Structure formats: structure tokens, C-alpha cells
Amino acid sequence: MDLLLYFWLLLKASLFSTGGLGNLPILHEDLLARGWATDRQFAEALAVGQISPGPSGLWVISLGYLTAGWAGSMLAVIAICLPPLAVLAVERVYRQLQNHVFVEGFIRGLSISVIGVFLVVLVRLLQANGMDGRALAITIGTIGLTLTRRLPVPVILLLAAAFGIILYR
């Protein structure tokens, strides 16, 4: 087993997951494909992680131990601690530079790009689920009525349902 590659796989799983058991599918795919872990080792690590006190993401340390001994458990500790520590370091640097014109411009640009990506994904999801002009009109009308706060929400929902029945007959 290449311990450097093993560490990279653990770190990658930590970086691309949201914590807890979020890294399970990534690690399962990577470690089983290389023959570095078995389903039984995953089951045992998850069982130890579930009965252990503390965050549920610590099961990775047990997996590291079961698959690569003490070195594996130490690499797992480092791999799951590095992403949150990196966030803290970035936050500290950001606090010192947040009022700089370059940083403010970067954050504005980043915000606009995130909104753009969100809208593209939203439109594709809506199209994939049958959203058309009629449904969009009902949605916009419903949002508009909700923002006015003149009608109770149940009435707005009933109106939206009625328009849906009329438009989709």
C-alpha cells in the first residue's frame, strides 16, 4: 500500500464531503477498487464510529487503523483535520483583508458567479421535471402574492392549485 496515495484518498474524501458519513461513498469506491479495504472493514469501522462518542465522521480513524494500522489511523486523523483547519486559516486571512478593494471586488464577482451557477442548475432541474411557461407563471404569481402579505398562505396555495387545474386541463 502506498501511504502517500492512501493519505491523498483520505484527504480527497474529506475535502469533497460535508462531514459525518459524507465521505463514505468516496472512500468505499477508492479503497475497494485498489483492494486496500474490504466491505467488512468498512462495516466494522462504521460500527466503531457509531458507538464511539463524538462526531460521526471519526469512523474514518477506525477505518484507517483497520486498513493500514497505526500509520493509517494517524493519516486519517490528519486528513480529516486539514480541511477545517484550512477554512480557519482562510477565514483569518480574509478578516485581515476583507476591506481591501481587490478582496471586495473578488467577493462581489464570486457572489455573482455563484448566483449564475445556481440559476443555471435551477433552470435545468426545472426543465428536467417538466417546468414550462404555465408552471413558471403560476410560480411567479404565487411568489408575488406571498410577498405582498395580503393573503394568507393557504389561500395563495389554493389559488395556485386552482390555476394549475385550469391551465393544465
Image (tube, rainbow, N blue to C red):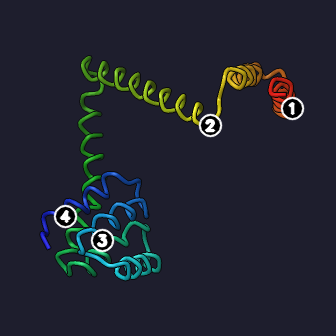
Task: Return the x and y of residue 134 as percentages of the image width and height.
Answer: 72, 22
State the image quarter where residue 159 is shown.
top right
Dot 3, how many residues are within 10 Å of its Cα: few (below 14), some (14-19), or many (20+)?
few
Image point (31%, 21%), residue name: 104
Q: Amino acid at mark 1?
A: Leu
Task: Return the x and y of residue 165 as percentages of the image width and height.
Answer: 85, 29
Residue 147 in sight here:
no
Name the residue carrying label 4. 7
Mark 1–mark 2 distance (CA, rounded to whole Å) = 22 Å
Mark 3–mark 1 distance (CA, rounded to whole Å) = 52 Å
Left or right, 51 with respect to 129, comes to left
Report the quarter where the C terminus lies. top right
- Where 7 sits versus 132, above or below? below
Precedes in sequence: disc 1 or disc 4: 4
Name the residue carrying label 3. 32
Mark 4–mark 3 distance (CA, rounded to whole Å) = 15 Å
* Badge 1 vs badge 4, beta-carbon distance below 8 Å: no
